């Protein structure tokens, strides 16, 4: 499987690992910080960003990260053999988030220190609040908020225009800058 070899060469200073025949595929315009870890069957899309201390471990199953999506510092993304972890386009996955065998649809925001578990689905344009727990099997509808532990749903509570402000465009630009300018100096 040669499809992922180019990422191994281009990102050789980063912790990107082949696991047997499972090879990460990272778009050339994606930014993966050198202190992030990407293992196995993981695909990272165009202009997406993966920040320091994030771990994407596609060992049992697979992980797919769409285009222009930000996986922020310290987040852990894992999967199971039966259920992949899918994160759509234009998403923000906040700091210290745990995603496990779930689906995050396009344009969603998963707030810092939150957890989304097996077979949960976060709809397009939805928001998972900071520190929330979205339990296995829960469906967060499009443009709804999931808040609390366990999460309670507030339907049609997300203003799509407000979700863009803290969102993906900032991280796409930051990823471009880091690709061009980041240099270790020690």
Image: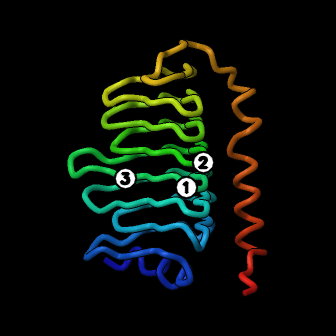
The residue to which callout 2 is attached is 95
Binning the other alpha carbons within 10 Å of mark 3 as few (below 14), some (14 to 19) or many (20 upward) gives many
Describe the element under mark 3 as helix, strand or loop.
Answer: strand
Q: Residue furthest left?
A: 82
Contact flag, marks 1 and 2 (Cβ < 8 Å) = yes
Q: Residue at x 50, y 43 (%)?
A: 88
Q: At numbered mark 1, what does the secondary structure look like: helix, strand or loop?
A: loop
| SS assignment at label 2 | loop
Q: Residue at x 61, y 43 (%)?
A: 92
- Image quarter of the N terminus: bottom left
Disc 1/disc 2 C-alpha distance (Å): 6 Å
| 5 versus 65 height, above or below | below
Read off the residue under disc 1.
74
Q: How many marks?
A: 3
| Whole-number angstrom distance, CA of label 1 to CA of label 3 | 13 Å
Image vertical order of residue 140 relative to residue 40, above or below? above
Q: In terms of image quadrants, where is residue 74? A: bottom right
Reading the image, the residue beneath label 3 is: 78
Residue at 51% from the left image edge and 37% from the top image edge:
114
User: Residue 2: x and y, percent?
Assistant: 36, 79
> Residue 25, located in which quarter of the rendered image?
bottom left
Mark 1 near mark 3, Cβ–Cβ under 8 Å? no
**Which badge, 1 or 2, is on the more N-terminal residue?**
1
Marks 3 and 2: in contact by CB < 8 Å?
no
């Amino acid at each position: 499987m040669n499809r992922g070899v180019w990422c191994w060469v281009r990102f050789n200073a980063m912790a990107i690992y082949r696991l047997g025949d499972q090879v990460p595929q990272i778009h050339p315009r994606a930014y993966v910080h050198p202190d992030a870890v990407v293992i196995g069957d993981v695909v990272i899309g165009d202009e997406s960003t993966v920040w320091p201390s994030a771990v994407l471990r596609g060992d049992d199953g697979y992980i797919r990260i769409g285009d222009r999506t930000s996986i922020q510092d310290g987040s852990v993304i894992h999967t199971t053999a039966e259920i992949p972890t899918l994160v759509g386009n234009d998403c923000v996955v906040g700091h210290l988030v745990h995603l496990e065998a779930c689906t995050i649809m396009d344009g969603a925001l998963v707030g810092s220190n939150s957890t989304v578990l097996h077979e949960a689905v976060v709809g397009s344009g939805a928001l998972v609040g900071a520190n929330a727990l979205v339990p296995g099997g829960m469906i967060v509808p499009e443009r709804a908020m999931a808040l609390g532990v366990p999460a309670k749903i507030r339907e049609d509570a997300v203003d799509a225009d407000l979700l863009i402000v803290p969102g993906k465009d900032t991280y796409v630009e930051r990823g471009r800058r880091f690709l061009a300018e980041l240099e270790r100096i020690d």
